[in-house]
């Protein structure tokens, strides 16, 4: 009971009776702190540029690949504070991803050959675009190891779909979106036979092994990829690397580079020189230039071949129809990045110090004139380098990836070997500035940097190594994302952030104002399908059904109560529990688990989730809410009773009364006190324009719900008191108080919200 008086006290405190603290230590001045922490003016400037005071928000939101974790990491810029991990290819327990039936269904879409793959080598996230600008609606990301692509809806930051590439064995050059997100591109990496589960010896590499590029059709209205309307292009076994879509003048075309046009097959075991020697022997590889709009038309005309049930335009057709061309690119290149105006494609040399800026106009002129320097071994026309290149710029050692600034013609390229970022002008081909970053930068990323309207401001260097940078945590180091200010002529390094979740290859950032995620679902929604959940119920409709050995629970969650409080089953029963969170208030998530059955659900306001398991062992298994959702969170519990087959009760022990009239009277007094708190809060809320704040309206609705339950419980305690049944009278009075506490809790939160939001008096 001590616990409760504490709660009453905290209610009073929250209602306005504060505490003051005194300290004997004088406050430090800024100068004191700089001295004590050995900080320079430059450090102070960097800190001021990244610090986001309490209550304030970041300007940009970054979606970073989670590398081998198979997840996506969301963080804010400039604070670099991590906001969320999104489970994508990998189960994520907190969100119940892979532990409830609805999300399992998404992960199951990623099964390959009937087998679950519970990790992913995620590389490249892409934000959906409208007219080439980020629109903040969807995020896509690829899995290189197991060729898959995932769709994340940015209304709730949940993974909605995983598609498996039907013809590749690995893919790297995805995900990148077309300017209106009608297609998402994904290019193969390691060549293999396109047929599934088909063996050819490596000696037949040139004839039977193939690369390719897939164009996944995206249905924006449904928010899903449509596999039957998607298609691929068969490509030579050149180890296709990254891709990008054209835009503006180059819209309708896509570009994919490659790094082993030598078609070299290693085999050091047989005395052959290794892959890395053979794949970098030649001075050039090939940039693939593809007319994808025309390719889509060819598919519609039935000119594709079905391989594994998937539309594939064979090379022969592509050559005949004039939709596939090659341009030499030096040397074992990496990355291809179309400029914001769509006029140029930038390819970095990796083993060559230059970046090559290709002109789309020149390429088109060569194609129109039929001016080709040769054909590759498969008959694909090759445009001469000098007929395609606008300018080649020596930037430094190991150039990899390029991103763009809001300033015209300004680009940034990562230099892997030099561990630097080069700022340069791609129109005129000159270097503007360089900044050293920590060891071995891979990708870099500017704000909205691969859209038609880059936002400039910041750049993130995604460094591969973190040697000496952070407090050591064992042989496996975190990755290091370094934030750089690019708003001035000289770049300034601002912040090092350790990222401890796989090797994130790439990230994308969007202005925070473009994201409009919801705070609740329409009650009864299956968030993984966005459709009404068949197991959803409203308050008062909860029930448990038993048919044969199947127990199905239609339950609800609301502070601080799980309905039902007991689930009875016999050994061997199949248990299905549908749970609907009836809350409307923001952030009132309830979690759900049943002891030792490896099941977990995260049930955000309005969501309905199903957990399912076999009660294959006799026993008593507590279930409970796993999110600290309210003062009575720990009491949000119940029991799954798994009885032996054919069990019958033998005797029922009567419950012993422990409460007296004095206890009851105390309860009644407590109820009256708490009602006074509620009345004062309600008085405040209704005195201001709370109806202008949808979040507060939701809280008020939830509070009204709780209040609405009081009359029934009140009738019960009064009835019991009349009969002198102090046991039941006390407990039902306590239940009235519970409803009051939840009402008051919501009310106080609404009040704080209104005060902070500057609500206006209306009377
Ligand atoms: S790749 Cu990793 S540094 Cu997968 Cu985009 Cu270049
Ligand atoms: Cu619901 Cu804790």
Image: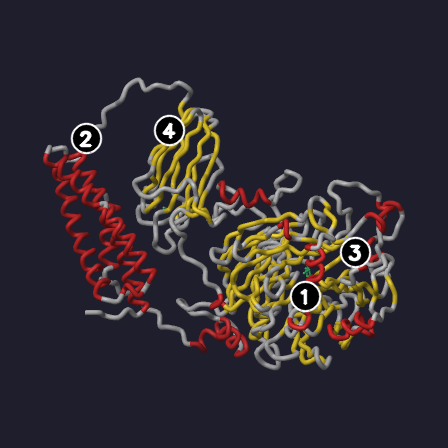
Q: CA distance from mark 3 to mark 4?
A: 64 Å
Q: Earlier in the sequence, mark 3 or mark 4?
A: 3
Circle 1 sits in a helix, a strand or a loop, which is it?
loop
Q: Give the residue pinned by disc 3.
A: 317
The Cα atoms of the two marked residues, 2 and 4, are separated by: 26 Å
Name the foreground residue: 83 vs 233.
233
Quarter of the picture containing the C terminus is: bottom left
Q: Which is in the foreground here, disc 1 or disc 4?
A: 1
Between disc 2 and disc 3, whose residue precedes? Answer: 3
Task: Confirm if mark 2 falls within 8 A of ligand 2.
Answer: no
Q: Which mark is residue 657?
A: 2
Dot 1 or dot 3: first in sequence order is: 1
Q: Nearer the viewer, residue 538 or 754?
A: 538
Q: Which residue is mark 1?
A: 252
The residue singled out by tag 4 in the image is: 568
Q: How far apart are labels 2 and 1 at the CA level?
A: 79 Å
Q: Can you see residue 759?
A: yes
Under tag 4, what secondary structure? strand
Other residues around mark 1 within 10 Å, as few (<14) / some (14–19) / many (≥20): some
Residue for point 17% across, 42% down: 714
The residue positioned 43% from the left and 41% from the top of the image is 534
Residue 428: x and y, percent?
72, 82
Label 2's element? loop
The residue under the point 70% across, 50% down is 311
In percent of width and height, residue 262 lies at 85, 58
Q: Residue furthest right?
A: 271
Nearer mark to the viewer, of 2 and 3: 3
Ligand 1 - quadrant of the structure image: bottom right
Upstream in sequence: badge 2 or badge 4: 4
């Amino acid at each position: 009971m001590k616990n409760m008086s504490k709660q009453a006290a905290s209610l009073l405190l929250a209602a306005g009776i504060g505490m003051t603290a005194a300290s004997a230590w004088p406050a430090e001045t800024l100068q004191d702190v700089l001295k004590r922490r050995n900080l320079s003016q430059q450090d102070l400037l960097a800190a001021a540029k990244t610090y986001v005071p309490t209550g304030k928000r970041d300007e940009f939101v970054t979606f970073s690949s989670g590398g081998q974790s198979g997840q996506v990491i969301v963080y804010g810029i400039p604070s670099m504070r991590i906001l969320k991990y999104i489970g994508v290819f990998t189960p994520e327990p907190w969100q119940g991803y892979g532990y409830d039936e609805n999300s399992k269904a998404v992960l199951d879409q990623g099964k390959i050959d009937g087998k679950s793959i519970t990790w992913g080598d995620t590389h490249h996230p892409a934000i959906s675009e409208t007219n080439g600008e980020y629109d903040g609606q969807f995020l896509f990301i690829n899995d290189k190891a197991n060729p898959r692509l995932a769709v994340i809806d940015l209304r709730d930051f949940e993974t909605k779909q995983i598609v498996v590439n039907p013809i590749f064995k690995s893919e790297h050059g995805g995900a990148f979106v077309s300017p209106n997100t009608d297609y998402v591109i994904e290019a193969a990496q390691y060549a293999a036979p396109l047929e599934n589960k088909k063996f050819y010896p490596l000696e037949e590499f040139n004839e039977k092994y193939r690369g390719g590029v897939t164009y996944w059709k995206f249905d924006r209205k449904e928010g899903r990829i449509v596999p039957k309307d998607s298609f691929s292009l068969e490509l030579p076994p050149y180890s296709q690397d990254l891709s990008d879509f054209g835009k503006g003048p180059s819209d309708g075309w896509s570009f994919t580079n490659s790094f082993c046009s030598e078609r070299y097959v290693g085999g050091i075991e047989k005395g052959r020189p290794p892959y890395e020697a053979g794949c970098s022997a030649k001075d050039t590889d090939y940039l693939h230039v593809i007319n994808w709009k025309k390719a889509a038309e060819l598919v519609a005309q039935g000119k594709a071949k079905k391989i594994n049930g998937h539309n594939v335009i064979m090379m022969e057709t592509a050559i005949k129809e004039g939709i596939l061309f090659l341009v030499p690119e030096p040397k074992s290149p990496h990355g291809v990045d179309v400029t914001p105006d769509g006029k140029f494609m930038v390819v970095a040399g990796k083993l060559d110090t230059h970046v090559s800026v290709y002109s789309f106009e020149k390429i088109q002129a060569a194609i129109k004139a039929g001016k080709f320097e040769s054909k590759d071994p498969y008959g694909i026309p090759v445009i001469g380098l000098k007929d395609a290149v606008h300018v080649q710029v020596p930037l430094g050692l190991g150039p990899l990836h390029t991103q763009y600034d809001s300033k015209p013609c300004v680009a940034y390229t990562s230099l892997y070997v030099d561990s630097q970022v080069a700022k340069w002008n791609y129109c005129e081909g000159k270097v503007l500035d360089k900044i050293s970053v920590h060891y071995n930068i891979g990708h870099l990323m500017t704000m909205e940097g691969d859209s038609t309207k880059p936002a400039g401001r910041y750049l993130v260097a995604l460094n591969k190594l973190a040697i000496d940078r952070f407090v050591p945590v064992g042989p496996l180091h975190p990755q290091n994302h370094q934030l750089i200010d690019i708003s001035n002529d000289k770049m300034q390094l601002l912040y090092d952030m350790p990222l401890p979740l796989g090797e994130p290859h790439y990230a994308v950032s969007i202005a925070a104002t473009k994201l409009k995620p919801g705070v609740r679902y329409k009650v009864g929604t299956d968030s993984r399908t966005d459709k009404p959940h068949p197991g959803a119920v409203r308050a008062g409709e909860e029930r448990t059904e038993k048919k044969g050995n199947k127990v199905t629970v239609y339950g609800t969650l609301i502070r601080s109560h799980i309905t039902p409080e007991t689930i009875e089953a016999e050994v061997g029963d199949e248990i299905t529990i549908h749970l609907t969170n009836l809350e409307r208030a923001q952030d009132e998530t309830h979690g759900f688990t049943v002891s030792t059955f490896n099941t977990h659900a995260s049930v955000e306001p309005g969501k309905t989730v199903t957990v399912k398991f076999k009660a294959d062992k006799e026993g008593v298994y507590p279930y409970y809410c796993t999110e600290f959702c309210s003062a009575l969170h720990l009491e949000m519990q119940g029991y799954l009773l798994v009885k032996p087959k054919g069990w019958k009760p033998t005797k029922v022990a009567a419950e012993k009364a422990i409460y007296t009239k004095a206890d009851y009277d105390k309860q009644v007094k407590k109820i009256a006190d708490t009602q006074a708190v509620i009345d004062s809060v309600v008085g405040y809320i209704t005195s201001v324009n709370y109806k202008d704040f949808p979040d507060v309206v939701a809280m008020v609705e939830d509070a009204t719900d709780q209040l609405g339950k009081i009359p029934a419980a009140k009738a019960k305690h009064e009835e019991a008191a009349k009969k002198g049944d102090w046991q039941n009278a006390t407990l039902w009075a306590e239940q009235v108080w519970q409803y009051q506490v939840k009402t008051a809790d919501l009310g106080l939160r609404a009040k704080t919200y209104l005060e902070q939001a500057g609500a206006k008096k209306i009377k």
